[in-house]
Amino acid sequence: MIRVVLAEDQAMVRGAFAQLLDLQPDVTVVATAGNGDEALAAVAEHRPDVLLTDIEMPGRTGLDVARELSRRGDPTKVLIVTTFARSGYLRRAMDTGVAGYVLKDAPIADLVSALRQVHAGERVVAPELAMAAWDSADPLTPRERELLHEVTTGASNADIAARLNLAEGTVRNYLSTAMAKLGARNRSEAANIARDRGWL
């Protein structure tokens, strides 16, 4: 029996997934979670074989949860199920050690197959994303990503400089470099491009 914790912030989707998975003779959903913190708590309590999680959730994202489980040395395998068909997300997911990445619009049979493969120790990636991941490398440095993430919160350069203990000129330089790499006209456009490609 494959024991699963299901993390999804949309209650209707979470309920539908749980019901569909429980119909499988070899799958049981032992707990559900509506955000990343609940997912971590559920994994710690139930010790499932697989955590089936969305990426974008309140608080910690699915990638944050995967990263934390990896840091803890938790044996639970992580299968990302998301609407985000973005190569940047896939690359970041693979970097955090997730075992699989599939899309929500795939047939339920594909999801169950991916779940079984992940449980068996295999890695599974949605075919439509596999090639794109290698064709679309993230050009940003970790610091540039950090600053662009701050831009998405509405922070000014002065705010960012204060938060990260940098000179305001240094912040401008990093953001200018990021804008040039992304072909953006301003810092907000650069942040939007990076987010759309899954690099933030």
Image (cartoon, rainbow, N blue to C red):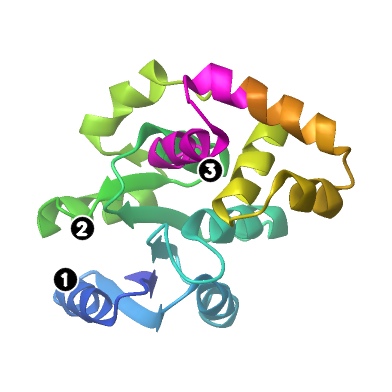
- Checking the image for residue 74, the label placed there is none
State the predominant SS element of the stretch in magenta.
Answer: helix
Number of other residues with Cα within 10 Å of mark 2, as a class: few under 14, some 14 to 19, many 20 or more? some
Q: Quadrant of residue 44?
A: bottom right
Query: CB of mark 2 within 8 Å of CB of mark 3?
Result: no
Q: Give the SS element for disc 2.
A: helix
Determine whether label 3 and label 1 are within 8 Å by CB. no
Question: For mark 2, what is the residue?
Answer: 112
* 160 in relation to 91, above or below: below
Alpha-carbon neighbours of circle 3 within 10 Å: few (<14), some, or many (≥20)?
Answer: many
Q: Nearer the viewer, residue 50 or 25?
A: 50
Residue that appears at 43% across and 34% down: 193
Residue nearer the viewer, 58 or 98: 58
Q: What is the magenta range?
A: 178-200
Comparing 169 with 11, the one in front is 169
Q: Which residue is mark 3?
A: 200
Residue 90's place in the image compared with 81, above or below, is: above
Residue under the image location 27 percent in, 76 percent down: 14
x, y percent for residue 12:
21, 80
Task: State which tag comes first along the sequence, 3 or 1.
Answer: 1
Checking the image for residue 24, the label placed there is 1
Left or right of 143: which side holds 50? left
Given the image, on which type of amino acid does mark 3 rest?
Answer: Leu
